[in-house]
Structure formats: C-alpha cells, structure tokens
Amino acid sequence: MAERKVMSNPIKVVCAHCDAVNKLPSDKLDAGGTCGKCKKKLFSGKSVTLKGAHAQRHFEQSGIPVVVDCWAAWCGPCKSFAPIFKQATKKLEPKVRFATLDTEKEQRLAARFKIRSIPTLLIMRNGKEVARQAGLMTLAQLEAWLKPYIR
Ligand SMILES: [Zn+2]
C-alpha cells in the first residue's frame, strides 16, 4: 500500500525578495529552499530591509521569529553593530528571519514601535513584539537572547 506523504506542520516563510508567503515542511526548513513565486532563495544570508506595509507582512505571516535591527545612518553604535547582525544572519538563518528597519526612512514604523534609542532590537512573533533590547550586543549575547524564541 502506497503511503501518502503529508506535509508535516508546514512553516510559513516570507520571501526576502518578493514578500510572497511560502509554506515549507518543517523538516525542510533547515535546507532553506526557493520561493515559489520569484524562484530566488528564501534565505541568502542577508537581512530583509523592512519597508512600509511589507513589514507587516513579514511580522504577521512569518512562521519563524523575525528579529529587527532598528538603526539609522548617523548612529555610530549602529554601524559597529551591523557586522555582528550580519554574522548572526549567516549563522542562524533559516531558524530566524533577520530584518533591518531604517528609523529615518521608515519613520511611521519606528513611531509605531516607539523606538527611543538606537540600536534597538525587536523580536516579532505572530505579528507581536515579544522581546526588545536596546544597545549593543556581542554575537554571543545576541545568540543567547534569540535562543528561547528559536524552535
Ligand atoms: Zn520570492
């Protein structure tokens, strides 16, 4: 008797390139995969730049936690944190989606999150902010902070 393969707990992944919502079987998440719409890699070791309404799509549709680096071009500490965030992206994708929010370009988003100092990091899950950390972190601190939110 042929066994019918059922997708085990598909996880929703929002494409970093076209914002399409893809469903990946949970056991395939580690392999990443390609977007059904634009055919690009769902995870490419680069963070997503959040823009306007698209940000909401990532927050609400993503089945994996989204960590957001809120920064600005004039902010020195933000610049020193950027390479750490990049390292974490390469290391922890696809368990976590990494995103950046330019608080100068996306002032409405920044206002919504009441960002008072930068850099500020947010963890979003199911459209809600579940954790927030202001100030610099080392790679080890960032990993430790994210750990409880990674399945
Ligand atoms: Zn895509």
Image (cartoon, rainbow, N blue to C red):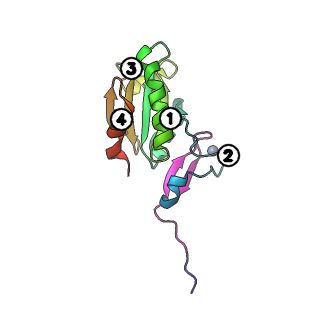
Q: Is mark 1 on a helix, strand or loop?
A: helix
Expressed as whole percent of the image width and height from the top left, the position of residue 4 reads 55, 77
Q: Residue 118 carries which label?
A: 3
The disc, 4 or 2, on the residue closer to the chain's N-terminal end is 2
Image side of residue 3 versus residue 134, left or right? right
The reply to whether dot 4 and dot 1 touch (C-beta < 8 Å) is no
Mark 3 Cα-neighbour bin, 10 Å: few <14, some 14–19, many ≥20: some
Question: Callout 1, which amino acid?
Answer: Ala
Can you tell which quarter of the image residue 133 is in?
top left
Expressed as whole percent of the image width and height from the top left, the position of residue 21 reads 56, 48
Residue 56 visible in rendering: no
Q: Does the residue labelled 3 lie within 8 Å of ligand 1?
A: no
Residues at marks 4 and 3, CA–CA distance in whole angstroms:
20 Å
Residue 88 visible in rendering: yes
Q: Disc 4 designates what residue?
A: 140
The disc, 1 or 2, on the residue closer to the chain's N-terminal end is 2
Q: Disc 1 designates what residue?
A: 55
Q: What element carries label 2?
A: loop
Magenta range is 5-24
Q: Disc 2 designates what residue?
A: 38
Image side of residue 118 versus residue 86, left or right? left
Residues at marks 2 and 3, CA–CA distance in whole angstroms:
33 Å
